[in-house]
Image (tube, helix red, strand yellow):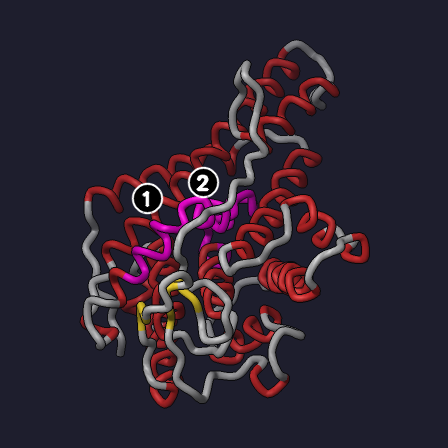
Amino acid sequence: MYVPKYTITTSVLKNIGLVEAAKEVIENAPLVPAWEAKFRGEARLKAAHYGTALEGNDLTFNEAKAVMEGRESEVVARERDVQEVINYRSVLDFIEGLKDVNNYTKDLLLQMHGLVVEKLVAREQTGQYRSSQVVLKNSVTGEIGFRPPQAAEVPFLVDELLRWLNGEYGKKEHPVLRAGVTHYVLAAVHPFIEGNGRTARALATLVLFNEGYDIKRFFALEEYFDKHAEEYFGSLMTVSNQSPMLEDRDLTPWLEVFTQALAMELTRIKEQVRELSVDIKIKEQRGMQVSLSERQMKLMEYLHSNGEMSQGGAGDGFGRHDFARPKGPDGQTGY
């Protein structure tokens, strides 16, 4: 059975501590239902937008929002870009609809992949392992950055991951680490012709949601990964190039990045939730209406979109990265 190698460093321990602290605040915050729905809606939108932007999708944030709201007919863009966001919406719906998954299975993984690549690849490649070799290239230099395992090894390697996830040994690990390991192994094995990164992030999200860390579904790791894409892809590459053998690789550098992403994302949300909670408690103590005023709602929307306030004005908050990202066999960037 595959047993991932990693060390619980001070950084990993600190990040998990921040996750636990934020989880406690967010899950016990007295938010009105309308604000909970708003947080969840924003998390879904960010997951779809940034999750596809990581792979080279050119839709703007507002265009992705229109697609997520079912208004794709209003978006004038490359058909493929629109379909990628539609597919991300579908896989998020699928994850949120699953309850108490007892076992992570091959069929579950293939079903998720099928949703990720619907109408993007040939039907015979949808929800199927790849049957050919692929390489990941630097999108600028064309140099090969990483060679995933041979196609013949894919079924065995994925089964080994699932055996660890479902087994007694793997279940002893913290859910955040289990999600991080899941993400890395799927990305490294690269089981599919296309959609590996999106499927890896989706299954990692399912592990978190299913094992007590859905945290009201207020968060989207994809935003952090896109805004720190060089660190994200770099840590995956660093681990993958340690050894040709998956079982010999030390996942610690990747897990430090993964746990930091979750810690930073949840800490940001915790502060937003705390601000709202304090306002609600004050109003309840004074016997006032709990719902926020129009001015407060606009202020919070501004903070959600821009992250901070300044007298000099705000940027759009949706900057894109310009650096060499790995490129897959189909020309799509991404790991």
State if disc 1 and disc 2 touch (CB < 8 Å): no
- Residue, far front: 141
Indicate whether 294 appears above or below 227: above
Reply yes or no: does residue 99 show up in magenta. Answer: no
Is 45 placed left or right of 263 in the picture?
right
User: Residue 324, percent across and down?
Assistant: 39, 56
**Region in magenta:** 209-237
- Please report the residue visible at 33 percent of the width from the left and 62 percent of the height from the top: 181
Is 115 placed left or right of 177 in the picture?
right
| Foreground residue among 85 and 133 | 133
Indicate whether 31 appears above or below 200: above
- Which residue is label 1 attached to? 16
What kind of element bears circle 2? helix
Indicate whether 10 appears above or below 242: above
Q: Name the mark nearer the viewer: 2 or 1.
A: 2
Q: Main secondary structure of the magenta part?
A: helix
**Amino acid type, label 2:** Glu
What kind of element bears circle 1? helix
Q: Quadrant of the C terminus?
A: bottom left
Reply yes or no: does residue 210 show up in magenta. Answer: yes
| Foreground residue among 225 and 136 | 136
- Please report the residue visible at 69 percent of the width from the left and 24 percent of the height from the top: 297
Question: Is residue 97 among what the camera can see?
Answer: no
- Which residue is label 2 attached to? 265
Residue 261, by quadrant, is top left
| Foreground residue among 61 and 69 | 61
Question: Is residue 127 among what the camera can see?
Answer: yes
- Please report the residue visible at 70 percent of the width from the left and 35 percent of the height from the top: 34
